[in-house]
Image (cartoon, helix red, strand yellow):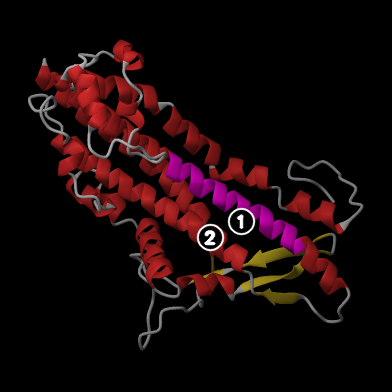
């Protein structure tokens, strides 16, 4: 048998063969997962500079400010529900009220982008965990099938698989919703009001990805892959979508492919969809798999589409901030 680059490899066990055929690290490279993360990481500093310029702030002063401005009330929690910290800082002249408002707007925008990155990072980690778990599962199931006669495929009911797929899908969709929220935040930014208004207070909490229809990125809102992803997220959260994955996990051997060796595989069907990404329905039923779609392949398409979207979204955000910066000066 040979590996992915043509080198002869001696296989001593089923486990080694599975790891060779389904090398998750190679898939990460093929789907561009690390490239996607690097694309997001490198934008942090550029966005910091751009938003600071619009708000007329010096980044040199950022690290002299109280950390509560950047952390209080976010994911790690906070105790300043009644604004006591704000009063303490402004009353003691640590920071003026005007600068406090500006830096709060800066921190809010920064946090939105940080959440955008964190959700994509989380989604890809769940996806990789799903791939790794399934490859381990294949190894176990093959050993079982080797002890059975005339058995080339088994169906497995696996709640962990369903959970990992669900978490990946929800995280990807939440990242898209954060992008819509950032776009709306951009529209609110006005150098004339940045020291008197907290923009986040004016931003609806449930701002969705669909808000990007008002931007040059509207084609992504109507994209088949993203539309199918969001529709699936809605079914996972509100209906019985998770059961599609939990009850339909197939593991088995395919037809001989190389030197009469059978190829082990796993297959989790993904619903039939039309050209717009809508589930194909008949008599109110919506789970058909005549297209033989695979959730693994679908999620890899999500990652590839997300990479294109992130690139264009970042260019759009920087362009908008630079335009506002020119109006400031």
Q: Residue at x 44, y 40 (%)?
A: 118
Q: How many numbered discs?
A: 2
- Along the viewing direction, whichever of 256 and 269 lies nearer the viewer: 269
What percent of the width, then of the height, locates residue 214? 17, 47
Circle nearer the N terminus (2, 1): 1
What percent of the width, then of the height, locates residue 209? 28, 52
- Along the viewing direction, whichever of 324 and 107 lies nearer the viewer: 107
Q: Which mark is residue 165?
A: 2
Is residue 139 highlighted in magenta? Answer: no
Q: Residue reaching furthest left?
A: 192
**Relative to 324, does residue 164 appear above or below in the rendering?**
below
Regarding residue 39, the answer to whether it shows in the image is yes
Q: Residue reaching furthest top?
A: 60
Q: Is residue 158 left or right of residue 48?
A: right
Is the residue under label 1 in contact with that under label 2 (CB below 8 Å)? yes
Look at the numbered disc 1 and give the secondary structure of its residue: helix
Regarding residue 292, the answer to whether it shows in the image is no
Q: Residue reaching furthest bottom?
A: 283
- Along the viewing direction, whichever of 19 and 238 lies nearer the viewer: 238
CA gap between label 2 and label 1 equals 7 Å
Q: Is residue 326 left or right of residue 279?
A: left
Q: Residue at x 40, y 74 (%)?
A: 239
- Along the viewing direction, whichever of 150 and 172 lies nearer the viewer: 172
Q: Is residue 272 left or right of residue 221?
A: right
Residue highlighted by disc 1:
130
Q: Which mark is residue 18?
A: none
Q: Which residues are magenta?
A: 118-138
Is residue 122 highlighted in magenta? Answer: yes
Q: Residue at x 45, y 44 (%)?
A: 120
Look at the numbered disc 2 and give the secondary structure of its residue: helix
């Amino acid at each position: 048998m040979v590996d992915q680059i043509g080198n002869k490899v001696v296989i001593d066990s089923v486990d080694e063969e599975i790891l060779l055929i389904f090398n998750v690290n190679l898939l990460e490279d093929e789907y561009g997962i690390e490239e996607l993360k690097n694309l997001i990481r490198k934008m942090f500093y550029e966005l910091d500079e751009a938003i600071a310029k619009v708000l007329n702030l010096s980044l040199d002063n950022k690290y002299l400010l109280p950390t509560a401005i950047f952390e209080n009330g976010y994911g790690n929690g906070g105790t300043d529900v009644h604004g006591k910290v704000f009063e303490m800082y402004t009353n003691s002249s640590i920071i003026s009220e005007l600068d406090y408002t500006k830096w709060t707007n800066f921190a809010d925008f920064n946090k939105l982008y940080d959440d955008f990155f964190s959700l994509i990072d989380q989604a890809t980690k769940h996806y990789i965990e799903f791939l790794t778990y399934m490859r381990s599962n294949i190894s176990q199931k093959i050993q079982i099938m080797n002890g059975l006669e005339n058995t080339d495929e088994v169906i497995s009911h696996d709640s962990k698989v369903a959970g990992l797929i669900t978490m990946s899908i929800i995280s990807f969709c939440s990242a898209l919703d954060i992008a819509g929220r950032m776009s709306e935040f951009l529209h609110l930014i006005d150098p004339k009001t940045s020291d008197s208004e907290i923009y986040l207070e004016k931003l609806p909490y449930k701002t969705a990805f669909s808000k990007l229809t008002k931007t040059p990125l509207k084609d992504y809102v109507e994209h088949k892959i993203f539309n199918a992803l969001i529709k699936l997220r809605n079914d996972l959260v509100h209906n019985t979508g998770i059961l599609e994955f939990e009850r339909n996990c197939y593991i088995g051997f395919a037809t001989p492919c190389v030197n009469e060796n059978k190829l082990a595989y796993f297959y989790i069907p993904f619903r039939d969809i039309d050209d717009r990404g809508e589930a194909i329905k008949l008599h109110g039923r919506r789970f058909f798999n005549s297209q033989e779609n695979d959730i693994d392949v679908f999620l890899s398409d999500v990652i590839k589409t997300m990479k294109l979207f992130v690139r264009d979204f970042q260019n759009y955000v920087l362009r908008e901030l630079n335009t506002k910066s020119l109006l400031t000066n």
